Image (cartoon, rainbow, N blue to C red):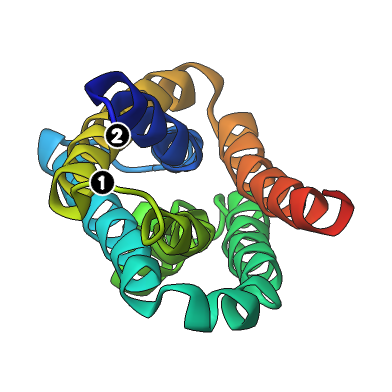
Amino acid sequence: MSPISIAVLAVGMSIDSLLASVGGGASLRRQCRLCDAILVGIVFAVVQMITPLLGWAAGAAASSYVASFDHWLAFGLLTLVGGRMVLLAFRAEEEGAPEASFIGTPVTLLLTAVGTSIDAMAVGVSLAFVKANIVVIVAAIGATTFLMSAGGVMMGRLIGNRFGRSAEVVGGLVLIGLGCLILREHLIG
């Protein structure tokens, strides 16, 4: 694969993580610190690197098995986390209400990262049949995802500061929408 092809692939695979990160940053109630953005970037990048690597390692043997359920898993995870964010946004005024953002807990952060990268496993399967250096590709995907996700959290926080609870609701709806888009792409397309 050419360097341009690798760059386009890395950006394309990072878009879901960027959108989810903007939503997570927008719904973060506490002050967003640079370390929050870096943590999200690292978690999203590592998961986004692992899933195509798993697909590549599995090769064609697992492609039909993974393809039969990956879209349902991504849809379920993103809808669950997004629905939780919307619900908690409406409970924001309650004393001791949990953080609406998926950034607030390690479990929801990991679920969101997995949900946004499940389809990357299928990309990894296809890479097994292309003459390409998987290490370079995975490194490019990881670096791009890190930068886009960390930047997305910071951008989302600026939006959240300006629009408050409505940004929290929109952040949750973005995750639900991503899940629906992934499901639609696989069912229709």
The percent coordinates of residue 95 (x first, y second) are 48, 62
Query: Which residue in the structure is indicated by mark 1?
Result: 132
Q: Amino acid at mark 1?
A: Ala
Q: Is residue 1 left or right of residue 13?
A: left
Q: Quadrant of the N terminus?
A: top left
Q: Is residue 5 left or right of residue 177?
A: left
Dot 2 crowding, Cα within 10 Å, few <14, some 14–19, many 20+: some
* Residue 177 placement: quadrant: top right
52 w.r.t. 156: above or below? below
The percent coordinates of residue 97 (x first, y second) are 49, 63
Residues under numbered marks 1 and 2 in contact, where contact means CB atoms less than 8 Å apart = yes
96 w.r.t. 171: above or below? below
Compute the Cα span from label 1 to label 2: 5 Å
First of labels 1, 2 by sequence position = 2
Q: Is residue 45 left or right of residue 157?
A: left
113 w.r.t. 54: above or below? above
> Which residue is painted at 35% across and 26% down in the image?
5
The percent coordinates of residue 2 (x first, y second) are 27, 26
176 w.r.t. 169: above or below? below
> Which residue is painted at 64% across and 77% down in the image?
64
Label 1 secondary element:
loop
Residue 97 visible, this orientation: no
Dot 1 crowding, Cα within 10 Å, few <14, some 14–19, many 20+: few
Label 2 secondary element:
loop
Q: Amino acid at mark 2?
A: Met
The percent coordinates of residue 45 (x first, y second) are 24, 50
Residue 1, disc = 2
> Which residue is painted at 65% across and 35% down in the image?
170
* Residue 11 placement: quadrant: top left
